[in-house]
Image: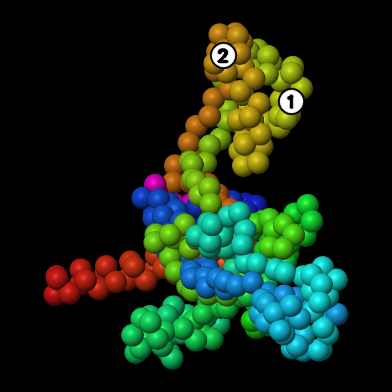
Amino acid sequence: MVSVEIISQEDDMMTVLFKDSDRALLNAVRRNLMGHIPKMAIDTVRFQMGTYDQCIKCEHLNPAGVARRTAGGTGCSKCDAAFEKEGEDYIVWETNYAIPDEMIAQRLAMIPVPTDTEAYSFEESCPDCKDLVDEDRGCPTCNMIYTLRAFGAEGGRTITARDLTFLGDDSGNVPEAYRDIPITILHEGQMIELWATARMGYGVNHAKWSTTAGVTFEPRQIASISNDKRAKILFDMGLRISKKDFKDGKLEDIDKVSDLKKDLHNVGAGTGLSDDFDDAITLEDVKGEYLLSFETDGSMTPAEALNSAFNRLAERFSAIKEDIDHVIA
Ligand SMILES: [Zn+2]
Ligand SMILES: [Zn+2]
């Protein structure tokens, strides 16, 4: 029976040890982590286009021109302030900036949106939308809506994920650690206004729906000293691992073996010491044991991602089993 043990865990990183396992299973877990975990990501963006006269007194945005005295306007539609002089009574803003809309949409897609699979579902399986045609789908149980309205400044102001506002409670806001992701820079007179819709998807369809990065696995290894005298060449360097870390000539601790591997680069090929050292310390795979490590993008914790990958695998395997049973029966 396969067993899994957490070796290290941080907010966005995890290493786990699999026992009684094999490469095929580890690879299945790896592929599921990368491509088959449900994740929310911004999928469509509606850009508002236009030019506005912003009232300096009350900050209200009036459609360009209509409120100006010179154009026969009667002033700010909210506070009635007269629009006589640009810069004194009103500021002109235009939804115009250096980066194309497509690129901004791409950047928004890659910002990690908190994913709560209990609260949200796929549009195709949403209880309220599944019977509708594609264009009509989208409701508070399958879509997360964000708005962005930001203004530039002299010298340029960087618009970041912090400027995105989630229409709903705080749980939908971009996590604090990722709020400094830049979206664009706006200069004087430039503004951006948009509505973005996040939907649930899978990493196999687009990288924006991939929760994990750097998913790797390797056999767990243990180290043994095969030649005490030559091994001393490494220990004498006073690096991470010393002779006393070894018990009866063997080193089994996972973190220490990882440190040892780094140390061994100092006596390996190309160092000029590899002939003298002559593989005095050797590494050997532990049968059936593998170390899996990965990072998440902030849309969920590593533990949630791993559980989700396991659930997905369990579903797939039971479906295969049913098919086989059906064929045999
Ligand atoms: Zn006003
Ligand atoms: Zn829905």
Q: Which residues are magenta?
A: 19-23
Sooner in the amino-acid sequence: mark 2 or mark 1: 1
Q: Is mark 1 within 8 Å of ligand 2?
A: no
Q: Residue at x 82, y 68 (%)?
A: 87
Image coordinates of residue 195 in percent, x first then y, are 57, 75
Q: Can residue 227 be seen from the camera position used here?
A: no
Give me the C-alpha separation between circle 2 and circle 1.
Answer: 18 Å
Name the amino acid type tagged 1. Leu
Say which quadrant the N terminus sits in: bottom left
Q: Residue at x 66, y 37 (%)?
A: 256
Local packing at callout 1 (Cα closer than 10 Å; few below 14, some 14-19, many 20+) is some
Residue 239, label in figure: 1
Q: Residue at x 17, y 74 (%)?
A: 326
Q: Main secondary structure of the magenta part?
A: loop
Identify the element where label 2 is drawn: loop
Q: Nearer the viewer, residue 170 or 280?
A: 170
User: Across the whole image, how many numbered discs are drawn on residues?
Assistant: 2
Q: Quadrant of residue 62?
A: bottom right
Name the amino acid type tagged 2. Gly
Residue identifier under label 2: 270
Image coordinates of residue 27 in percent, x first then y, are 40, 51
Q: Is residue 149 above or below residue 111?
A: below
